[in-house]
Amino acid sequence: MASKIQSVKGTREFYPEQMSLRNFIYEKVRAASQAFGYQEWEAPFIETIDLYAAKSGEELVKKQSFTFQDRGGDFVTLRPELTPSLARMIAAKQGELTFPVRWWSFGPFWRYEQPQKGRSREFFQWNIDLLGVDSPEADAEMIAIAATFLRSVGLKPQAATIFVNNRRLMNSEFDALGIAPEKRIEVSNLVDRRSKMEPAKWEAYGLELGLTQTQVDGLKNILGDFDLWKKSDELTRLFAALEALGVRDYVKFDPNIMRGLLYYTGTVFEAFETSGSLKRAILGGGRYDNLLADVGGQPLPAVGFAMGDVVVGIILQENGLLPEFALTPASVLVTVFNETMLIKSFELAAQLRSAGLDVMVYPEPVKLQKQFKFADKMKIKIALTVGPDEAANDEVAVKNLATGEQVTVKREAVLEVVKKLMN
RNA sequence: GCGGAUGUAGCUCAAUGGCAGAGCACCUGACUGUGGCUCAGGUGGUUGUGGGUUCGAGACCCAUCAUCCGCCCCA
């Protein structure tokens, strides 16, 4: 057992059952994206590390990226996120694209971190972005798409909530407390940790960062003020738009939401399950108005979010929201009576396939008992048999495995009989 | 990178330091042209790996590898 070659730590192996789940998520993602008129696109899975160095955050680049040398000696990275690739691709065609651009994508990403519940080193992520519009209403559309997805998988507002904040609002509040602009990143970090630390330790940490007691107290007031959004025109308009879009019940203002990525400039949001064991964000995103200019394009406002497949998969499973995935690979099994009947079975299967049915032929002439047992395990509902008796009369035995009833019909009537059984 | 837990049959798990077991799965038969249900029988293990303690180790000790859970960070 120890000598077996193992999968690379943290990678994902999708057996058919897990593949059904992944495809289920993909379909819901696609439906929500297309409902708002977004186009599917994709970027390279491998990029240079430089693409991320500028704006992704030090932790992500230095510690969490899969980076290695290719055979030519160049350093390449398995993409840990999509937004920098998007920014580059938009910048490259900025003159010829029709704005606003509405794009979505669902593909694999890699981050070198310790695998644990809700986190693997390889994951699939939905990214969706709206570029070219700088308005709270654009932010609202993005949040509405997220809410539409949550609703489509059966997560009600009581079960999953999208928490919203605004970096500009927070920065002006930080300014009002006399916190220097160069301390914003550290203070944001402090805010991020509040829910994870004991109050006393959190205060001590704030003082350690060089804040005064008055500033720490002021920060506590801000973070406890859930009406703070009323001071922000942006958020006031955002909530009005969310009301109009019919998703207001999914969204709550929360001044504690900051998000780690450096490129966010305005509205930020994260969705969490309200109860349950997993304290990880289902999805997260926000407005990033400077990124295009930072990668060498013309300034372009943008808003978007990302959702990993791992957390949402666990939550759907734990809430019993997954449909019964049909593990039936075919609606009909054609058994093989013996060596000489093999060709007859293949002919019959081909005939049914050309009529559009999914048909499996047992690949070798083993005991019929074994073949029927196989059909049962695969949850195939109809089994066809051509034995010597049937062949002599140009007939086929059609068995309904759900009821156990079997009829023998003329070969030209098989299609009709099978179709009737399928309904 | 740090901390905790767990590694026994294909799977889920038992086994006071004293003969390695059960359920499920698999195979065979009852039923040689037909699944599910039942019954009878059977295959399957260097107990993750390498050392050590002991008359004797699945169990105790050390190391190592792997997995899971948490911290950091984050989708």
Image (spheres, helix red, strand yellow):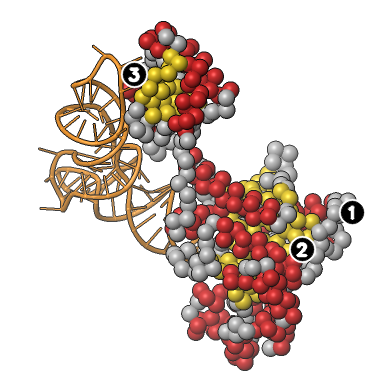
Marks 2 and 1, how far apart in space? 16 Å
Mark 1 lies on residue: A95
Name the residue at 48% across, 21% down: A414
Q: First in sequence, mark 2 or 1: give its number.
A: 1
Quadrant of the drawing holding the N terminus of chain A: top left
**Chain bearing mark 2:** A
Q: Nearer the viewer, residue B45 or A421?
A: A421
User: Which x, y percent locates residue A225?
Assistant: 60, 85
Name the residue at 49% across, 39% down: A16
Q: Which mark is residue A302?
A: 2
User: Which x, y percent locates residue B8?
Assistant: 29, 42
Determine whether A191 is above or below A57 in the image: below
Residue farthest toward the right in the current orientation of the protein: A95
Q: Are marks 1 and 3 in contact (CB under 8 Å)?
A: no
How many numbered badges does the structure rendering display?
3
User: Which x, y percent locates residue A402?
Assistant: 37, 34
Tell me the amino acid under the disc marked 2. Ala
Mark 3 lies on a secondary structure that is loop
Residue A84 is drawn in which quadrant?
bottom right
Q: Nearer the viewer, residue A396 or A370?
A: A396
